[in-house]
Amino acid sequence: MSNINFEHQMDAKGLFCPEPVMMLHDEIKKMSVGESLEIQATDPSTARDFIKFCSFLGHELLLNEERDGVFFYIIRKTS
């Protein structure tokens, strides 16, 4: 279990590509620079997709782990 702080949460459990990434784009737009978002997802492709999202747009991936079939991510908005 992570002790990284976050201000926002997104539940993408049960959704499949491209829905989680589309939701992530929408959530990031609403956030201020420096704020973090916790995401819970069940689609394994989110690991690849969210890493690419952060790399391409310059956001920080603070957490990327799987627990009991649920993938947890924390992303910090940097720009």
Image (spheres, rainbow, N blue to C red):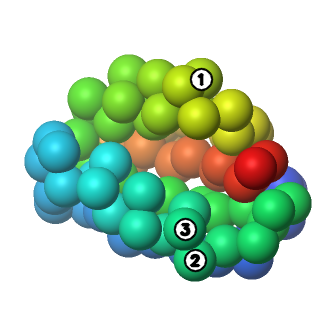
Residue at image location 52% in from the left, 48% down from the top: 72
Residue at label 2? 30
Front residue of 68/70: it is 70
Give the image location of residue 16, x and y in percent. Answer: 13, 48
Front residue of 30/14: it is 30
Residue 30 visible here = yes
Q: Secondary structure at mark 1?
A: helix
Q: Amino acid at mark 1?
A: Ser
- In the displayed structure image, the side of residue 31 where residue 26 appears, left or right: left
Q: Secondary structure at mark 3?
A: helix
Residue at label 1? 55
Give the image location of residue 26, x and y in percent. Answer: 41, 68
Residue 1 visible here = no
Q: Residue 29: which disc?
A: 3
Q: Amino acid at mark 3?
A: Lys
Q: Quadrant of residue 48?
A: top left
Q: Amino acid at mark 2?
A: Lys
Tell me if residue 5 comes above or below residue 47 in the rendering. below
